Every structure is written in structure tokens, then in C-alpha cells.
Image (cartoon, helix red, strand yellow):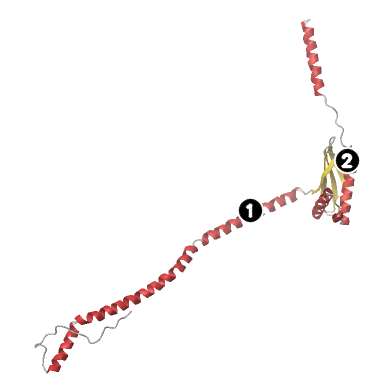
């Protein structure tokens, strides 16, 4: 009896887990055929609007954005040729529809995003080959590294220019000093001249000359008979600045 109860309990648990695992089936927003037809309609409409160049006459921002994206991709995609395939991932309200189109130069994917049963975004993305992607990556890398090296070289040049700044400042600051050094020797020379003139009264040679002149005027043959005690100048000394 206990075994039967145990088996019955296990069966009940398994049935309960199975019931919990069941989910209600979600009805997609549209079938695959409808999604394919809708994607084709969107692509045809956008391509025609771009060809007609009537973007200024359209008020819908989603359509205008779709036309801008198509025009930006047209340089690499080329002229629109045909629709290749359509893939969709949809639930009851949201989803994405990818339409692969063929251009005269490259293929592209038109991505249609649906949110709450309303189209919110339409963009065109060009499909590049692996070699083209690697080439773009290499060019971007070279451009980035070149920019960095140019900036580093410019910074290095600016730092090297700092060496000349003190020399320039010193050159400008030396100008007034030069004037002062020029004026100083002149003043020293004038002072020396004045000192020499002031010391002439004590010069022995001057005393001897004056003594000889006095002796000659007195009729004496030598200056032994008299002594010169002082010399007075007739006239004021000239002052020099």
C-alpha cells in the first residue's frame, strides 16, 4: 500500500511539473510571407522617394531618417538592383525584419525595427567584404597612431622652445643694466679727474716750479734762501658734474 501511494505521489509531481512547463503559444505580429511583403514594400518606397528627391515634402521623421540612411549607403552600395532575401524575427508586438538588397557595387541590409506594432527605425547597412573591413581597420589604426605621434612631436617641440624663454627674458632684462654700466665708468672718470685736480696743491713738482719762478723774480740764483709754506690760487675751482 505504501509503495502504491509513493508511486501515485511521484506521478502527481511529474504531472504538476509538466503543467508548469507549458506556455501559451505566441502569435507572431505577421507571418513570414507578410513580413517579406512588408519589407519589400518599405524598400521600394524608400528607394523611390530617394530617386524622386522629395524628402522636403515628407513630414514623417522615420521616413526621412530612412531616406538619409539610404542616401549615405548609396555611395558604397551603388544603384538599387533587386531584393535578394528577407529574414524576420517577430513576436506578438515587437520584431526585426532584415531585407537583403543587391546594389550595383555591393549588397546591403535594410533593417526594419518594430516596437509595439509600430515601425520605429529603418536603416540601410552596407555589407563589406572581410578584406575591405580589414583595410578600413588598418587605415583607422594608422590615422589614430599618426595623430598621436604628430601631437607628441608638437608637444616635444613646445617643450624644447622653453629653453629659449629664459635667454629671451635675460636679453630684455639686460638693457637697463647696460645703460647703468655705461654711465658708471663716466662718473668714475669724472671723479678721478676731480681728485687729481684737488691733489695738485700737494704736488712737489708744482712747488718746485713755483719756487724757481719766485727765486728768478727776486734775482736769486737758487731757492735755498726761502721756503714755500702755502700756495693760494686766485680764483674759484671749477666744479664738474
Corner quadrant of residue 85: top right
Residue drawn at (77%, 7%) of the image: 3
Q: Nearer the viewer, residue 39 or 176?
A: 176
Camera-side mark, 1 or 2: 2
Residue drawn at (56%, 57%) of the image: 155
Tag 1's secondary structure?
A: helix
Q: Nearer the viewer, residue 152 or 169?
A: 169
Q: Where in the figure is residue 224, as x and y percent of width and height?
A: 9, 87
Q: Where in the figure is residue 93, as x and y percent of width and height?
A: 84, 36
Which residue position is annotated with label 1? 145
- Is residue 194 depicted above or below 127 in this figure? below
- Mark drawn on residue 35: 2
- Whether residue 112 can be seen here: no
Residue drawn at (45%, 67%) of the image: 173
For label 1, count other residues whose C-alpha is less than 10 Å away and answer few (under 14), some (14-19) or many (20+). Answer: few
Relative to 216, 109 lies left or right? right
- Whether residue 160 can be seen here: yes
For label 2, count other residues whose C-alpha is less than 10 Å away and answer few (under 14), some (14-19) or many (20+). Answer: many
Q: Earlier in the sequence, mark 1 or mark 2?
A: 2
Quadrant assignment for the C terminus: bottom left
Q: Nearer the viewer, residue 240 or 94?
A: 240
Q: Nearer the viewer, residue 43 or 59?
A: 59
Q: Where in the figure is residue 113, as x and y percent of width and height?
A: 82, 42
Residue drawn at (53%, 59%) of the image: 159
Q: Where in the figure is residue 124, as x and y percent of width and height?
A: 81, 48
Tag 2's secondary structure?
A: helix
Relative to 234, 151 lies left or right? right
- Residue furthest to the left in view is 225
Corner quadrant of residue 170: bottom left
- Is residue 114 depicted above or below 151 in this figure? above
Mark 1 vs mark 2, CA separation in Å: 46 Å
Amino acid at each position: 500500500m505504501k509503495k502504491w501511494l509513493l508511486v501515485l505521489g511521484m506521478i502527481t509531481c511529474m504531472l504538476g511539473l509538466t503543467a508548469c512547463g507549458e506556455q501559451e503559444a505566441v502569435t507572431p505580429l505577421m507571418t513570414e510571407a507578410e513580413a517579406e511583403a512588408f519589407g519589400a514594400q518599405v524598400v521600394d518606397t524608400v528607394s523611390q522617394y530617394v530617386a524622386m528627391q522629395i524628402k522636403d515634402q515628407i513630414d514623417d521623421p522615420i521616413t526621412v531618417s530612412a531616406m538619409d540612411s539610404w542616401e549615405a549607403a548609396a555611395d558604397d552600395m551603388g544603384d538599387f538592383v533587386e531584393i535578394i532575401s528577407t529574414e524576420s524575427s517577430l513576436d506578438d508586438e515587437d520584431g526585426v525584419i532584415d531585407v537583403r538588397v543587391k546594389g550595383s557595387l555591393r549588397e546591403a541590409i535594410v533593417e526594419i525595427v518594430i516596437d509595439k506594432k509600430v515601425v520605429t527605425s529603418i536603416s540601410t547597412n552596407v555589407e563589406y567584404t572581410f578584406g575591405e573591413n580589414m583595410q578600413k581597420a588598418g587605415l583607422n589604426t594608422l590615422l589614430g597612431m599618426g595623430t598621436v605621434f604628430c601631437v607628441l612631436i608638437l608637444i616635444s617641440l613646445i617643450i624644447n622652445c622653453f629653453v629659449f624663454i629664459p635667454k629671451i627674458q635675460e636679453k630684455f632684462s639686460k638693457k637697463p643694466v647696460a645703460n647703468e654700466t655705461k654711465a658708471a665708468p663716466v662718473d668714475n672718470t669724472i671723479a678721478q679727474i676731480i681728485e687729481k685736480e684737488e691733489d695738485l696743491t700737494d704736488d712737489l713738482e708744482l712747488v718746485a716750479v713755483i719756487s724757481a719762478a719766485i727765486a728768478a723774480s727776486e734775482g736769486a740764483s737758487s731757492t735755498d734762501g726761502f721756503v714755500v709754506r702755502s700756495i693760494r690760487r686766485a680764483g674759484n675751482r671749477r666744479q664738474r658734474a
